Image: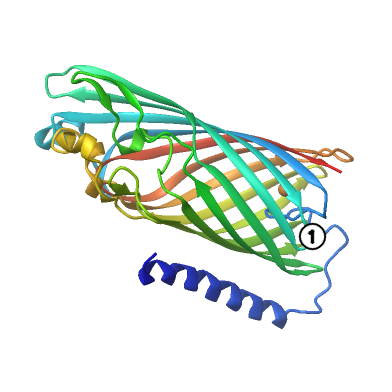
Amino acid sequence: MCSKKLLPAAILIAISAVVQAEDRHHEGHAGHEDHSRHFAHHAHEPGEWMLSYRAMTMAMEGNRDGTSDVSDADVLVDFMVAPQNMDMTMHMIGAMVGVTHDISVMVMVPYLNISMDHITRAGEQFTTDASGIGDMKVIGKYLMVDTQDKQIFLSAGLSVPTGDTEVMDTTPMGEVRLPYPMRLGSGTYDLILATSAQYALDNGAWGVDGEAMIRTGSNNGYTLGDRYKLGGWYTRGIAPEWSVTGRLSGETWKDIEGADPAIAHMVAMVPSADPSLRGGRQINASLDLNFEPAGSEHEFSIELGTPVYQKLDGPQLATDWVASIGWRATIN
Ligand SMILES: [Cu+2]
């Protein structure tokens, strides 16, 4: 890990220090009884388990270069093949357990279905598919500050390269190793550093969070770009067991370093095989409806999101919308 990769980590720690200082400033401010009910982040008491499942679908439609949409014809001027759209469905199974009052550990395993439609200069259309287990994540969450009406977490974790990066499918060129966006994992051990702060309100809560995903090492000659996320959310109770959450988050991810020699011959053919056309940044807005039946250990949510700003090193497929449904249960 080089020093430039440590900078974002330092920024995250600085943010949490500032938030914590701000926090002390408000110390003594009395919260109400059920202060943590609307919190987005949580910890578990020692020995308490949580199981979760989330199904997410992301739809990508059309290409974008910078902040402008480009047509298939525009892409086909420079490339023989233009990706047209991609759908990704992810089934995420998670388990979380409290180790101490301050430390919880979570494990998440995704199962992915990815499908991409393409058109060639000759007008021929074809689809590539990939599915399987993605990268497993193990994350430790440290509850650094826990008072009546606020909580601050520091998290550190590891993304383990359990997802297949050598997925194959049939194209007009025959059976080939699929380009980067079709792969099920990063291929590298990635460090996850995150922090979040949340504040209780009367019948609601709000918070800010940040996350860095830092790639280490390389796989088949390449390393995916690091990703950084910064977001804010606001939750409000709308009925005794129901609440809505609005979220705005910014995300930036770098281009791929190096290149997979197995698809080097495809770089001039299709933009998804070019490591320098993978980076981007976007701002996402989402709305989340939560249902927590009284006296139950279960919690349900449904979320719908869309980018409100997208700037891509393109041509690259742009995200249209993201939707998910989730369930979780606490087991004592
Ligand atoms: Cu949990």
Q: Position of residue 43 (x, y in %)?
A: 74, 56
Quadrant of the rendered image containing residue 296? top right
Per the image, label 1 sits on a secondary structure element best described as loop
In this picture, is 64 found above or below 4? above
Q: Residue at x 56, y 46 (%)?
A: 137
Q: Residue at x 12, y 24 (%)?
A: 121
Q: Position of residue 113 (x, y in %)?
A: 46, 27
Count of numbered circles in the view: 1
Tag 1: amino acid: Thr
Q: Is residue 120 visible?
A: yes
Question: Which quadrant is home to the C terminus?
Answer: top right
Quadrant of the rendered image containing residue 63? top left
Q: Residue at x 61, y 60 (%)?
A: 155
Judge by depth and name the residue closer to the eye, 305 or 15.
15
Residue designated by label 1: 100
In this picture, is 8 found above or below 289? below
